[in-house]
Each structure stands twice: as C-alpha cells, then as structure tokens.
Amino acid sequence: MFYASNAMAEDHESHVAAMGDIRVVHPWARAADAGGSTLVFMDIENAGGPVRLTRVRTDVAERAELVGIVMEGTELTTAAVGAIDVPVGEVQLDPGGLAIKLDGLSQELAVGDGIEMVLSFEPGGELTVHSEVEPADAREHSHAGHSHD
C-alpha cells in the first residue's frame, strides 16, 4: 500500500487528504458484505490547473472503478466513466452523480470501519485517502455540513 510522503498529507481527524492544489474532503463508503460491492463518495477540491482522476486502487476490493450513477426506472445502476475531470473548483462524488465502485470486497465493511485507497491524478500523482464506512443507506457523510477551510 502507498503511504503519505512529504508531497501529501492526510488528517484523519478532519477527513481531509491533500496533495499540492488537490484536496479530498469527507471520503466515505457505504457498509457492505464481503464479496459484494460498495460505492465511495467524496468532494475533490482543485485550487490549481485542471486535472483528471484516472484510477483508484485499494486492498479491500478486487476491482475499483470510476462510475456514473443513473436511475433506470426504480433501479439504481452504474456505468464506467473511465476518468473524472476535476476543473478548478470542486467536483462532488455523491449518490446522485459520480462515485468510485468497489467490487469483490475482500472483507465486510461495517459502520465505523475505514478503507484506505490510492487515487491517481493526471497530472499530479497519487494521493492516499482514508474513507470512513457509513450505513448502507446513507446519503451523505455523517460529518457533512461542517467546513475544513
């Protein structure tokens, strides 16, 4: 697993990971059973030039993929998006739009657990983030609504 270097920092207390002009705020995942799938959400803030989130890896799943979430009738489905553009400003990965899908979970993800993931940005490099596990039906991070300025 990739660990923080001088170029990046993560603050578990404030739910923020940063690398240069990129900040990942409030990463969280939904609880799920071993062998199953879950979705991971977060806010990505960019104070510099445009970048792209191109890849995610983690030890807790066989596969991690960047997806868009769509409603088909009454069913929630996902479709691979390849990469996520992060222009200057903020991109939200949330239950109504974009997410990271983890398939083939190697362990149960229970409320209160943590997931370590490595996000790859082009240009920019890799950023390790720690996502907290929330209830399976959660619509937002339990700490949403407070600032990390």
Image (spheres, rainbow, N blue to C red):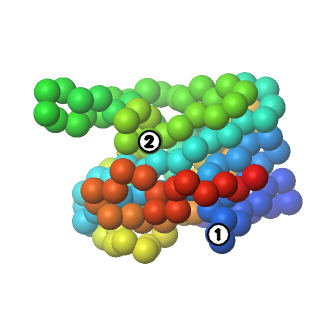
The image quarter in which residue 95 lies: top left
Q: Residues within 10 Å of mark 2 (few under 14, many from 20)?
A: many
**Residue 105: in sight, yes or no?**
no
Which comes before the other along the chain, label 1 or label 2? 1
Which quadrant of the figure contains the N terminus? bottom right
Side of 79 relative to 1 (left or right): left
Label 1 sits on residue: 12
**Residue 50: in sight, yes or no?**
yes
What is the C-alpha distance between the residues marked 1 and 2?
20 Å
Rendered image: mark on residue 119:
none
Q: Amino acid at mark 2?
A: Asp
Label 2 sits on residue: 94
The residue located at (47%, 28%) in the rendering is 82
Q: Determine whether the residue tagged by mark 1 lies in a helix, strand or loop.
A: loop
Q: Position of residue 70 (x, y in %)?
A: 29, 29
The residue located at (24%, 34%) in the rendering is 77
Nearest the eye: 99 or 126: 99
Nearest the eye: 142 or 116: 142
Number of numbered markers? 2
Side of 77 relative to 90 (left or right): left
Q: Position of residue 76 (x, y in %)?
A: 22, 37
The residue located at (14%, 27%) in the rendering is 73
Residue with the most extreme left position: 74
Q: Residues within 10 Å of mark 1 (few under 14, many from 20)?
A: few
Q: Determine whether the residue tagged by mark 2 lies in a helix, strand or loop.
A: loop
The image quarter in which residue 15 lies: bottom right
Q: Position of residue 12 (x, y in %)?
A: 64, 69
Q: Amino acid at mark 1?
A: His
Residue with the most extreme front position: 145
The residue located at (55%, 29%) in the rendering is 84
